[in-house]
Image: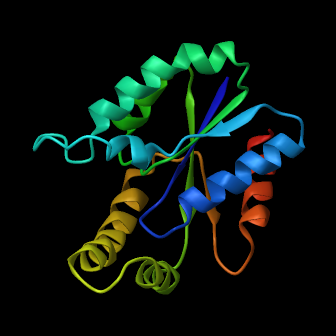
Amino acid sequence: MQVVALSGTVGAGKSTVAVALRDALLARGLAAGEVDVDAIATETPSPPDDPFNERVVVAHLRTMRPLWRDAGLEVLILPRVIETVAQRDAYADALGEPVRVVRIDAPTATRHARLVARHPPGPERDWHLARTDVLAVLLLAAGVEELVVTNVDRPPSAVASQIVDLLGL
């Protein structure tokens, strides 16, 4: 099983591109699936020392690994902010496979517009708008990704096709 993590800051389009990537791989005859990692992380309260519930995510991936393999899954797509090499390696350890990280990038104005459209005015929107800018700088400096793909002014299917080609899937 190959594992592709679509990283990127808030509002870059990770989840949208993940669905398009799954569809592109299925169209090429590969058994592919995408997992809403953020939903897994938010299904239980986060402890103070693990604000994004990474331990829950890693435990879930470890538990699901044999089921995905038994089902014949060839490519697993994980849309999730990957901030550090240690985080990537924890996912790889849980899944028993290397994790190829693709950072989805989008300009600040595009990310902000997406977040404003997604969240009503208030503290949650304010947090996301602030987080996207901080995270963009952090991810650029971390350099965890194998490649970077821009997600602006083209359909998610085009972004997904580019990822398929660049990764040789």
| Residue nearer the viewer, 110 or 31 | 31
Horizontal side of 25 relative to 14 (left or right) equals: right
Image point 38% across, 51% down: which residue? 142
Asked whether residue 166 is in view, the answer is no
Horizontal side of 80 relative to 53 (left or right) equals: right
* Quarter residue 169 falls in: top right
| Residue nearer the viewer, 164 or 67 | 67
Image point 78% across, 49% down: which residue? 23
Q: Quadrant of the N terminus?
A: top right
Asked whether residue 12 is in view, the answer is yes
Q: Position of residue 167 (x, y in %)?
A: 74, 43
Residue found at the very far left of the displayed protein: 48
Image point 36% across, 36% down: which residue? 87
Is the residue 43 above or below the residue 135 in the image? above
Colour mapping used in the image: rainbow
Image point 34% across, 43% down: which residue? 41
Q: Position of residue 13 (x, y in %)?
A: 56, 65
Numbered marks: total: 0
Is the residue 59 above or below the residue 41 in the image? above
Residue found at the very far right of the displayed protein: 28
* Quarter residue 57 falls in: top left
Horizontal side of 61 relative to 77 (left or right) equals: left
Horizontal side of 21 relative to 55 (left or right) equals: right
Is the residue 153 above or below the residue 73 in the image? below
Q: Position of residue 83 (x, y in %)?
A: 36, 48
Q: Position of residue 163 (x, y in %)?
A: 73, 52
